[in-house]
Amino acid sequence: MQAIEVEGLIVRYGEVVAVDDLHLTAEAGRVLALLGPNGAGKTSTVETLEGYRPRAAGSVRILGLDPARDHAALTARVGVMLQRGGVYPGMGPAEALRLFAAFYRRPLDPAELLERVGLGDVARTPWRRLSGGEQQRLSLALALVGRPEVVFLDEPTAGVDVQGRQVIRAVIAGLRDEGVCVVLTTHQLEEAERLADRVVIIDHGRVVADGSPAELVTETAGRSIRFGAPAGIAVSDLATRLGAPVLEVDPGEYEVQAPATPAAVAALTAWLAERELPLADLRAGRERLEDVFLRLTATGGDGGAS
């Protein structure tokens, strides 16, 4: 079942087009990661889906309802996690959850939810004394206390330690199993690759990629060799040896623009060995989601708007 349906969405700020003819769907029981660089239009898109941002054109349906016109009807069915704030500084997690639970007809049990997000031991600790990760987990719990059918999570693991990230991942997996549609926005692409069933990358207000993490990576597999080495190596010399362009895409991160054949990999490692240069990592024939994201958004993507 499609929990979210967006057709031809346009969002403007005066003469500036922030979202340009965007089409998007999201299913119940699936995690959708909505990714994009700063200014790509993802925040405007999510705020429109949540019913807080007016649209200039297009159709938006959340659980079959218009989030702007039917906002009151959707309030009890949609959860929104804020990245920061929303809680009185002197209020503890238990009190905050009991307060929010009172807004819903059939809320989750606050005490059980506290344990679910790993905050049972700090239930009475004031918000201002919680760590950043604990505040994030409380924000997640507040978004879930009303039993939402669709939940929007904004940077849910930002500032969260390893143990906290594991808790959040488990909660998101549980939401998927319960049939909840989860829309995740994050700059942590490893988290998106780990958590999402489907990834949509937008740039300049348009979709430039849409598919599962495996599909997005597989589409470009074998086209290049990515490796790590000390910053500033002689890429022109290496390019001559390999007979293919070599780019330093980031300090210490390189791309050989040639298929990842055994001969090319052997020539690369031999060149590094001759110069006693360490090889930090080698990704031959397979990109990470981060590589796909950077390639598509570096110049606006294949279908980016100007």
Image (cartoon, rainbow, N blue to C red):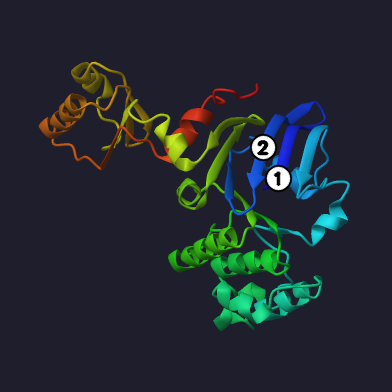
The residues bearing labels 2 and 1 have C-alpha atoms spaced at a distance of: 8 Å
In the rendered image, which quarter contains the C terminus?
top right
Quarter occupied by residue 40: top right
From the image, tell me which residue sits under label 2.
Answer: 24
Q: Which mark is residue 270?
A: none
Determine the residue located farthest toward the left in the rendered image: 274
Looking at the image, can residue 237 be seen? yes
Residue 42 left/right relative to 172: right
Q: Residue at x 47, y 47 (%)?
A: 193
Query: Pointer 1: residues within 10 angstroms few (<14), some, or many (20+)?
Result: many
Where 268 sits versus 60, above or below? Answer: above
CB atoms of marks 2 and 1 within 8 Å: yes
Residue 50 left/right relative to 274: right
Where 247 sits versus 183, above or below? Answer: above
From the image, tell me which residue sits under label 1.
Answer: 4
Camera-nearest residue between 306 and 235:
306
Determine the residue located farthest toward the front in the rendered image: 1
Camera-nearest residue between 218 and 127:
218
Residue 15 percent across, percent down from the top left: 80, 26
Where 94 sits versus 26, above or below? Answer: below
Looking at the image, can residue 90 be seen? no
Q: Residue at x 64, y 58 (%)?
A: 180
Three-letter amino acid code at the position of disc 1: Ile
